[in-house]
Amino acid sequence: MGIDKEKILGIAQRYILKGQSKKAIKELQKLVEASPQDSRLRLKLGDLYLKNGENESAFKEFLKVAELCEGEDLNLRAISIYKKMLSINPNYIDALHKIGNLYTKEGLEGSAKNCYQTILKIRPDNPEALSALERINYHQQPRDASKMAPSGNFFISQPRPSSEARIAEERRLPPSHGPREPFIPSEETEEVPSSNKDEEMHYHLGIAYKEMELFDYAITEFEMASEVPSIQFDCYIMLGDCYMEKGDHNKSIEYYQKASEIKGLSNEKMARLHFNLGLAYEASGRVSEALNTFKLVLKLDQSISDAQEKIEKLQLLPK
């Protein structure tokens, strides 16, 4: 007889709301035993262990999640989990090695170098970190600067799909929470304009964190990435989305408004942005502002039929 996943998740959630984390853990353990390859369930279980002060059990679950992500070549998700582990124990060298290796696979040698330098601050004689740094420094030299390869074995990566293909793959996993008011995503947020690779990585890590419902981590990454003008609009939209998910409607409104102030936006972008802004106003109980915002959406783009439905619904409410 199959296990009723939704029913057990509901029971676990009720225990969580009552502050009965141990009972919630037992319910989630049933689901993980039934679906051991479900990374989202393991992530939820790990979070519960962490909240309950069971750090060792939490680490085991997070490690399994990261390994599952690596096995599916979802490197950004794996990095996000290893970083979550480091936020608990900054001296967890195995996680630093994993992150450095994944950054190298992504061609982000600057970020990888930082990881290995961090390892050497903890263990100055770590042979793997020393070898990796030697390799990276060699690769970063001008091609005619030296014809001599450094000692040690080089890591030879296999041909990989394009960055766009990998990011698209990492976005496929649907959210685990129940249905909620959908945002209308801007088409332009699907791709990030080319900029410094390390800055793009903050954006893509933010996406990975967001899709795994690690909104606080996602917010940190998007805030750092928003310093780059070419991806600022995308970051503000994502920040607004994250705060909506967290239930902080005022912060969500703040970021959507910031996005609307960027010059040169197309009517389509403005319409989709204001639809999200209207949702935030509605969620915060600001009916009049929500109504005016949805009316503006239709002026900008009459193809967004959901805006008309929102207007009709809000007109029935007291202002």
Image (cartoon, helix red, strand yellow):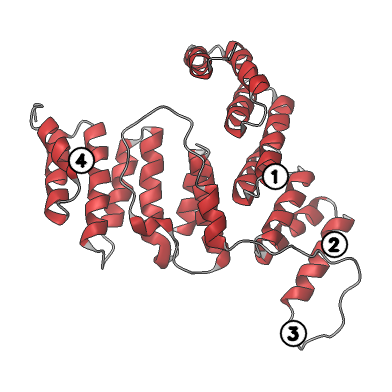
Closer mark to the observer between disc 3 and disc 4:
4
Q: Are marks 2 and 3 in contact (CB under 8 Å)?
A: no
* Secondary structure under the numbered disc 3 in the rendered image: loop
Residue 245 located left or right of residue 295: right
Q: Gap in Å between the C-alphas at discs 1 and 4?
A: 39 Å
Q: Are marks 1 and 2 in contact (CB under 8 Å)?
A: no
Q: Are marks 4 and 2 in contact (CB under 8 Å)?
A: no
Q: Mark 3 points at which residue?
A: 143
Residue 146 drawn above or below residue 22 = below
Label 3 neighbourhood size at 10 Å, few (<14), some (14-19), many (20+)?
few
* Secondary structure under the numbered disc 4 in the rendered image: helix
Q: Name the residue under label 1.
A: 71
Q: Gap in Å between the C-alphas at discs 4 and 2?
A: 57 Å
Image disc number at residue 130: 2
Q: Which amino acid does label 2 sit on?
A: Leu
Q: Which amino acid does label 3 sit on?
A: Arg
Say whether disc 3 or disc 4 marks the residue closer to the N-terminus. Answer: 3
